[in-house]
């Protein structure tokens, strides 16, 4: 019993903390606090190996894309959206409770608009297109 | 080629402490080279001093800045293509007190198999 606690409890607590980071990142993202969302997920990403790593990075790049977009950095936004979609496409249609299909579709649509903005073929970005991360 | 930080950088600073050559500086911060201080290359974003970048040749098997960058914005500079030999010579020049062994898969990305 003591051995179990020594070996597994810290790991269990670590997973709880990681899940807390994940949830807080989603909250910040859905409040459109994209820098904060990226910052929280970045900590998670740095500690993660294995299958979740690219997933977290895809979320980070999604948040950073919207951060760049909010600053008028269209080139940076478009590039981040591309990288994000390439990663999140590996986790369709749902992963870790996230509706990745909905997220990828929304980010893809936003990237298309950003490309039009870059070319001057669109006057402004419709902020209603910014997705909320939906848990499935 | 030296490594370059693109405008996708979000100034998280993850790369700076990882550079074995102290080639990375925050935007607006002067950089040191050869005992002298120089004006920053970028005022807004983290930047890499190309004269101090060895693409981690001599140290690691991949660019450490790129390895820790969450937004994949540390990329090879296509305008500064350099050979492994040039980069290794630079590492030796930058670290005159260090004894470098022969390059291997652990100390040069050029030795990695595809």
Image (cartoon, coloured by chain):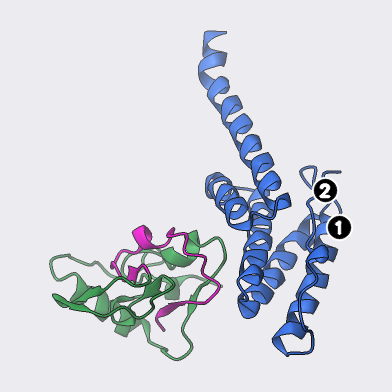
Q: Is residue A82 above or below residue A33?
A: below
Q: Name the residue under label 2.
A: A134
Q: Position of residue A62 (x, y in %)?
A: 69, 62
Q: Mark 1 points at which residue?
A: A102
Q: Of residues A103 and A36, which is closer to you in this image? A: A36
Helix, strand or loop under label 2: loop
**Location of residue A124 by image quarter:** bottom right
Mark 2 and mark 1 in contact? Answer it, CB < 8 Å.
Answer: yes
Q: Of residues A60 and A31, which is closer to you in this image? A: A31
Position of the N terminus of chain B, as image quadrant, is bottom left
In this view, the residue farthest toward the front is A123
Provide the major secondary structure of the magenta segment: loop
Q: Where is residue A16 in the image (x, y as percent from the top left)?
A: 63, 30
Magenta highlight on residue B67:
no
| Residue that appears at 36% across and 81% down | B84
Q: Residue A54 carries which label?
A: none
Q: Colour of chain B?
A: green
Helix, strand or loop under label 1: helix
Left/right of residue B93 with respect to residue B49 in the rendered view: left
Q: What stretch is highlighted in magenta?
A: B1-26
Chain drawn blue in the picture: A
Position of the C terminus of chain B, as image quadrant, is bottom right
Q: Distance between the residues labelled 2 and 1?
A: 8 Å
Q: Where is residue A136 in the image (x, y as percent from the top left)?
A: 86, 43
């Amino acid at each position: 019993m003591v051995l179990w606690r020594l070996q597994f409890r810290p790991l269990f607590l670590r997973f709880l903390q990681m899940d807390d980071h994940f949830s807080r990142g989603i909250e910040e993202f859905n409040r459109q606090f994209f820098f904060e969302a990226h910052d929280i997920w970045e900590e998670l990403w740095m500690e993660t190996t294995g299958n979740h790593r690219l997933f977290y990075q895809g979320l980070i790049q999604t948040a950073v894309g919207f951060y760049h977009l909010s600053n008028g950095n269209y080139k940076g936004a478009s590039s981040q959206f591309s990288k994000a979609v390439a990663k999140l496409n590996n986790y369709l249609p749902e992963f870790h409770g996230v509706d990745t299909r909905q997220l990828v579709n929304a980010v893809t649509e936003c990237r298309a608009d950003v490309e039009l903005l870059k070319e001057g073929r669109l006057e402004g970005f419709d902020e209603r297109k910014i997705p909320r991360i939906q848990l499935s | 080629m030296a490594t370059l930080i693109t405008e996708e950088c979000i100034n998280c600073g993850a790369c700076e402490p990882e550079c074995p050559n102290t080639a990375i500086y925050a935007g607006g911060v002067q950089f040191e080279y050869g005992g002298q201080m120089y004006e920053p290359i970028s005022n807004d974003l983290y930047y890499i001093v190309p004269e101090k970048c060895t693409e981690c040749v001599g140290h690691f098997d991949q660019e450490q800045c790129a390895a820790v960058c969450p937004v994949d914005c540390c990329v090879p500079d296509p305008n500064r293509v350099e050979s492994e030999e040039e980069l290794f010579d630079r590492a030796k020049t930058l670290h005159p007190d260090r004894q470098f062994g022969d390059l291997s898969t652990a100390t040069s990305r050029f030795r990695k198999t595809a």
